[in-house]
Image (tube, helix red, strand yellow):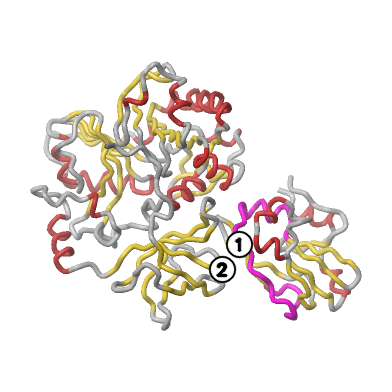
Amino acid sequence: MKKIPLHFFHEILGAKFIEFHDFIMPLYYTSIKDEHLSVRERVGVFDVSHMGEIKIKGKDAKKFADFILTNDILNTSYGDVKYTVMLNEDGGIVDDLFSYTISDDEILLVVNASNILKDYNHIKKYLWKGLDLINESDEIVEFAVQGPFSQELLQKFTSYDLEKIKYFKFDIIEIFNERVLISRTGYTGEDGFEIYMSKDKGEKVLKEILEKGKDYGIRICGLGARDTLRFEVSYWLYGNDIDETINPIESGQKFLVNLNKDSFVGKDALIKIINEGVKRKFVGIEVEGGIARHSNKIFDKEGNEIGFITSGNYSFVLNKSLALGYVNLPHGEIGEEIKITQDRRVLNGKIIKKPFIKPRVKKEG
Amino acid sequence: MSKVLENLFYTESDEWIKVEGEIGIVGITDYAQDKLGDIVFLEEATIGKKVKKGESVISIESVKAAADIHSPLSGEIVEVNKEAVQNPQIINEDPYGKGWLFKIKIENLDELKDLMDAKKYSEYRKE
């Protein structure tokens, strides 16, 4: 098990830990619910240093990133962040990630903790001559400051006007008396920022955020709230909702794929998939009588197995048990009634619209 | 350190029972609610159902996990805490009070000898 750089600081803060892939991570400090609501109503800070940072450096790094990723990276410039997937040759999702364009010759990829080595090896396979691929994951700490007061709080640490950083933009700025990369991004459906810095600065910065954050009722939040928050706005969790057996058309992530690009890894397979038509659909489900969980099976009213649950949880904002999952087409119409077999009972479910609540991020006009 | 009350009997699966004459009030311990974390679902027990000591009666679910609740003694379910079914969070807030789960009519008080008292349970769940 790998400890994140600030592990012992989190222990002092009272974290309960959980094993998450290769990492031992804070799950919660006080209660998942309290932490969840602090982000929806005020502000919360997460140490997400388990996330991977992989750099592509050298001539035409951006062009190369455009080739291995599905979204349009080619037409980006300094300050742009793109949410994208990376595919295998069969069109399956290797990872979903953020791509930061630092220059035409430098791209930063922020990848899922569970996929750092896999992604590195996948990219290495295609790497163009003259490019360097650098895994900086162990050297960097990442904090996510999320919630309606996140900008107001962070503004106290810098003379730089944070309003200038729009949604899905980043800049490298002076803040906390350090030079750090900060983006207006997140995984909670609230306005907020993600901050990357070298690990030696982490503890000092987190302490400052928590201290000043007291005025806003800040909570330090763990992976538990991170999961319940992303779930309410139906953001995909790699390993749960998407993986290499699932393509971005069926996962509802076609918006991350730019088919106008000349070529990208997985494009041929994806075009074939689109032409043949996908066989299943990613849907939202309202659940009665319990919590549906990953890999529970979904049945139609006649008892035919029609799909599976990928994420299930309780929504602290809607006060309902909800789930995400795949159902075979033509199933999946809004309002369709289904059954879910859980470990203990059969639960009733109904297909509903997702996201369950609308993200309140600051969308660009 | 989680709270353990003096006048209750405890199971190894972290239920408590309070004996009032022939009626037993059943709940989960402070240790159990803390381990489960935010409780979001409590199955409603069926009134009139006969249960054996140690039998799984209902399930309880938190954000993190699901668990079975076992009856500490044999008997018949005579009352259900509807408030806890409606608002399971009270189990976290007050596991020995407002967050009780169900009541049984105790069949055989001799079975109490198999349960732990507060002192033994505290030892058992010492971290």
Vertical relation: B82 (above or below) B1 = below
Residue B46, magenta (yes or no): yes
Q: Is residue B55 left or right of residue A57?
A: right
Determine which residue is flagged by label 1: B41
Residue A239 position, x and y percent, is 38, 55
Looking at the rendering, the stretch of residues picked out in magenta corresponds to B28-56
The image shows a total of numbered marks equal to 2
| Mark 2 and mark 1 on one chain | no
Q: Residue at x 84, y 63 (%)?
A: B18
Q: Residue at x 55, y 66 (%)?
A: A290
Mark 2: secondary structure = loop
* Residue extending farthest front: A365
Q: Residues within 10 Å of mark 2 (few under 14, many from 20)?
A: some
Q: Which mark is residue A135?
A: none
Q: Position of residue A101 (x, y in %)?
A: 23, 33
- How far apart are the two marked residues, 2 and 1, measured between alpha carbons? 7 Å
Q: Amino acid at mark 2?
A: Gly
As rendered, which of A192 and A68 lies closer to the eye? A192
Q: Quadrant of residue B87?
A: bottom right
The kind of residue on which mark 1 rests is Phe
Q: Is residue A203 left or right of residue B24?
A: left
What residue is pinned by disc 2?
Answer: A289
- x and y, in percent, of residue A350 in the image: 44, 69
Q: Position of residue A92 (x, y in %)?
A: 25, 58
Answer whether labels 2 and 1 touch (C-beta < 8 Å). yes
Is B118 inside the magenta-drawn segment?
Answer: no
Residue A304 in the image: above or below residue A71 = below
User: Which chain does tag 1 point to?
Assistant: B
Find the residue positioned furthest to the right. B21
Residue at figure coordinates x 15%, y 45% from the top left: A67
